[in-house]
């Protein structure tokens, strides 16, 4: 009997720690809203965040943007749901929701910029080259591109981070139409 | 003969599995709940060694080899100061941008944001906020002249310790140094309650 109890306890401990660790890596599962390929949590870093989001935030050490400052969207996949892959080329654009400024940057799976020879880690709305109609396209690729080129660097999987600064959206970000957000189009691999 | 021996063994294995699941569920819940309480790896714990209370510390530009805080915008220059309301309210001042975007966010020791404002709230080119405890707020309002109330923007913190973060968006790579200089303009000063 004692042996059985000990086995159950050891197995349970392992199981609990493993699932706990996994849940924290994935972050806030209940708070996040998905808009196309983009994931946003309007409760991140607030007192109303769910326990998983809180624990994940503690582990990552991130200082989340407050709702009053702006919103942060993260994409791990393209429009078709395929994971972003450094061997492929992507085009991000042409529209963004209303905000004073936006930035688009590329990070590794832990949320840090990826080393690249051009030392280009992101674009700002204030510097991006636009078409005559105001539309923008950022080429996310390992190969150099003319125009807005966001280099991928060397890592396998990566994520795109799109931030809106001073946006009227606030807590209503979850109701954003997919078409209002920039698309993440795979161009080829 | 075989079946009668296998049945109790199966029951035993099932019992162990059920027990393991139960223990696992408890451990899982405890892990998730205890991590934010211990807070050994959160932003506050990472930033604490970088500076004294009330000291303004400029954060390095987010780069691949700068792995202190993840998901930091490489276009944004930031600075922070830690506050401790034990000795009195803390006045936070920051220069607003002439162009671009700047913001202040106020974080409790537990990592949640309790207040944030952007340079739109600036008065005469400056953001000015007084962080207080609920008790300090009561003391300040009690002493106030009703005909001439203070113009201070008072923000109540739920923990004595916390963090103020200033973010300044640079509008082009060439303007990053200027944004950094602006972020360094953050100041946090303890203003003891008048006796």
Image (cartoon, coloured by chain):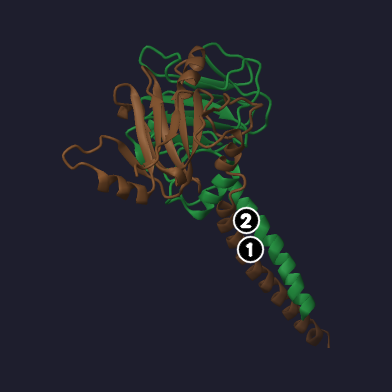
Chain colours: A green, B brown
Task: Determine if marks 1 and 2 fall on one subunit.
Answer: no
**Left or right for A160, reference A71:** right
Report crowding for label 1: few under 14, some 14 to 19, many 20 or more residues within 10 A (C-alpha): many
Identify the residue shown where x is 67% and y is 56%.
Answer: A18
Q: Is residue A71 above or below residue B100?
A: below
User: Which residue does the numbered mark 1 point to in the structure image?
Assistant: B27
Identify the residue shown where x is 59% and y is 30%.
Answer: A107
Identify the residue shown where x is 64% and y is 34%.
Answer: A157
Mark 1: secondary structure:
helix
The numbered mark at residue B103 is none
Mark 2: secondary structure:
helix
The answer to whether residue A98 is visible is no
Label 2 resides on the chain identified as: A
The residue at the far right in this view is B1
Q: Position of residue B159 (x, y in %)?
A: 45, 49
The residue at the far front in this view is B195
Report crowding for label 2: few under 14, some 14 to 19, many 20 or more residues within 10 A (C-alpha): many
Q: Quadrant of the C terminus of chain B?
A: top left
The answer to whether residue A154 is visible is yes
User: Which residue does the numbered mark 2 point to in the structure image?
Assistant: A20
Q: CA distance from mark 1 to mark 2?
A: 8 Å
Q: Position of residue B180 (x, y in %)?
A: 50, 20
Q: Position of residue B38 (x, y in %)?
A: 59, 53
Q: Is residue A103 above or below residue A15?
A: above
Q: Position of residue B91 (x, y in %)?
A: 39, 35
Q: Is residue A50 above or below residue A185?
A: below
Do the numbered discs 1 and 2 sit on residues whose CB atoms are within 8 Å? Answer: yes
Q: Nearer the viewer, residue A19 or B10?
A: A19
The residue at the far left in this view is B147
Q: Which image quadrant for residue B13?
A: bottom right
């Amino acid at each position: 009997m004692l042996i059985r109890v000990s086995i159950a306890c050891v197995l349970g401990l392992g199981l609990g720690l493993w699932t706990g660790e996994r849940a924290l890596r994935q972050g806030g599962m209940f708070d996040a809203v998905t808009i196309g390929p983009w994931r946003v949590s309007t409760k991140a870093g607030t007192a109303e965040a769910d326990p998983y989001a809180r624990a994940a935030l503690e582990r990552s050490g991130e200082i989340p943007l407050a709702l009053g400052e702006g919103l942060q969207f993260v994409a791990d996949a393209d429009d078709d749901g395929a994971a972003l892959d450094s061997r492929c080329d992507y085009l991000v654009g042409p529209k963004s929701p209303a905000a004073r400024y936006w930035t688009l940057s590329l990070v590794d799976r832990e949320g840090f910029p990826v080393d690249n020879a051009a030392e280009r880690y992101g674009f700002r709305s204030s510097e991006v080259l636009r078409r005559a109609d105001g539309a923008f396209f950022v080429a996310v690729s390992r190969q150099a591109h003319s125009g807005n080129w966001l280099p991928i660097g060397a890592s396998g999987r990566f994520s795109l981070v799109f931030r809106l600064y001073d946006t009227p959206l606030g807590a209503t970000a979850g109701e954003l139409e997919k078409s209002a957000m920039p698309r993440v189009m795979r161009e080829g691999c | 003969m075989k079946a009668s021996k296998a049945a109790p063994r199966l029951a035993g294995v099932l019992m162990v599995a059920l027990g393991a699941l139960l223990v696992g569920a408890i451990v899982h819940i405890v892990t998730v709940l205890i991590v934010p309480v211990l807070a050994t790896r959160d932003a506050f714990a990472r930033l604490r060694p970088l500076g004294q209370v009330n000291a303004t510390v400029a954060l390095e530009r987010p780069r691949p080899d700068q792995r202190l805080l993840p998901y930091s915008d490489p276009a944004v220059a930031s600075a922070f100061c830690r506050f401790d309301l034990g000795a009195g309210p803390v006045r936070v001042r920051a220069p607003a941008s002439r162009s671009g975007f700047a913001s202040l966010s106020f974080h409790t020791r537990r990592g949640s944001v309790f207040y944030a404002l952007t340079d739109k709230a600036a008065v005469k080119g400056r953001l000015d906020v007084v962080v207080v405890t609920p008790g300090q707020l009561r003391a300040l309002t009690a002493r106030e002249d009703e005909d001439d109330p203070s113009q201070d923007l008072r923000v109540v913190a739920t923990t004595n310790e916390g963090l103020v973060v200033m973010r300044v968006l640079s509008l082009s790579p060439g303007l990053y140094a200027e944004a950094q200089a602006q972020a360094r303009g953050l100041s946090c000063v303890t203003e003891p309650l008048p006796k």
